[in-house]
Amino acid sequence: MKPDLKSLTQDEVARLLIKQGHPAYRSTQVIQWTYERAAESFDAMSNLSLPLRQWLAAEFDLWTVKELREQHSTDTTEKFLWQLRDGQLVETVLIPATPGLTSRSDRHTVCVSTQVGCAYGCKFCASGLNGFRRNLTTGEIVDQVLAIVRMGRTAGIRVGDAPPKPDPEFRVQNIVVMGMGEPLANYDNLMKALKIINAPWGLNIGSRKITVSTCGLPDQIKKLATEPLQIRLAVSLHGTNDKIRDQIMPVNRKHPVGELVEACEYYAKTKGRMMTFEYILIEGVNDDLNLADQLSAMARRLHAKVNLIPYNPVEGLRWQRPSMDRCHAFAARVKSRGVAATLRIEKGGDIGAACGQLRLQTMRKTSPDVPAES
Ligand code: SAH
């Protein structure tokens, strides 16, 4: 197998080129074509000589995700379903920061996947319904962002009902690692991808604009605390005690709340940075106002922000979102305890933008053995 160019750092590419007798500046050119200009093939690297392009094509793989489907939400969130080399499907979501505006300077957030399927089987989530297939490679994580950049620049990204408009200046400002899969279970590939996404020679996205979300793997949270990269951490808490968390998140049976909190304390102490607790509100499961008090106490202790997300129902699953009144009351209660909390009105709800839903719908259409219920 040829090395995948987008799984390599600039230094690694330079070393391979120098080893074969090419001058080091060639690697700068190749890297610029790959990231700054989002080239899809070595052929497109027009200021390189034909023999060099042929040599590169023989030595490296410059593979791109293939678009299978896209969905547009009325709030301008867009979701893309990609096919990978081995036929597996992953999703990427593009979320404009200012929905409804057509300005070209809109900030864009890209939500990337890290695994095909998921092994953690949270009961409310579509990603794990069909089990875990494999980790994504570094290049497959990086190319999800590049694919959006290519599309924005050449075909155009749709904003609302307007037809897609190409934008040569199109940029992605934020990355959230909240797509399919458990990012911290694919630690090494993810960290390398984030280095490439962050690097000035790569996608040049500021580390503080990158958020990694985890279902709560204590050892990996501690490991992340020692990384030099200043990315943001979000923890999918969804329950403040073992009784609730055990019911909806099987990972809690292995790593109960106490262990998770200890890892979060370590992270907060080591990094000295605020983390975010994500808390999906599910009717009758975790939306009692007493739980808002427990959540506030935990958040205060860990100096964490709270992101409340009304549950986005998944076809075939029994969980429901509470009434908006209940969601607002829960948020008000958390805030009244002095915690920075936001109630996120889920974007892309009408296109099934919650993890894994588009892939699941597509798989159900094409293969009847995909379970409709868990
Ligand atoms: N595995 C990681 C990242 C992927 S999920 C994690 O668990 O954090 C990103 C976020 O979406 C998580 O907080 C997850 O619990 C949440 N989520 C999954 N399905 C959802 C749904 N149907 N509605 C709302 N949020 C959902």
Image: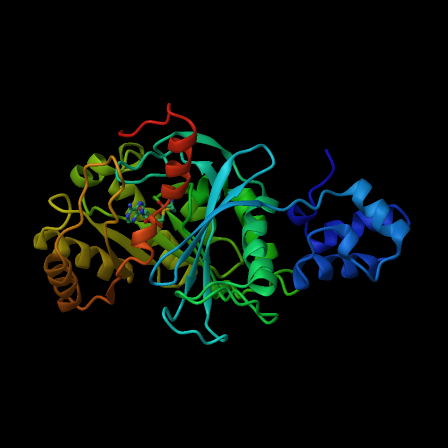
Residue 217 visible to the viewer = no
* In this picture, residue 34 sits left or right of residue 278: right
* In this picture, residue 238 sits left or right of residue 275: left
Above or below, 308 against 21 in this view is: below
Return the residue nearer the eye: 123 or 10. 123
Q: Which residue is painted at 61% across and 70% down in the image? A: 168
Q: Which residue is painted at 19% across and 37% down in the image? A: 318
Return the residue nearer the eye: 337 or 168. 168
Q: Which residue is painted at 63% across and 46% down in the image? A: 64
Q: Which residue is painted at 46% across and 76% down in the image? A: 103
- Residue 268's spot in the image, x, y percent? 36, 58
- Residue 176's spot in the image, x, y percent? 43, 56
* In this picture, residue 43 sits left or right of residue 296: right
Residue 305 visible to the viewer = yes
Quadrant position of the N terminus in the picture: top right
Q: Residue furthest top?
A: 369
Return the residue nearer the eye: 64 or 138. 64
Quadrant position of the C terminus in the picture: top left
Q: Which of the colour schemes (rainbow, by chain, secondary structure, one colour) is used?
A: rainbow
Above or below, 91 against 87 in this view is: below
- Residue 216's spot in the image, x, y percent? 34, 44
- Residue 307's spot in the image, x, y percent? 27, 59
Count of numbered circles on the image: 0
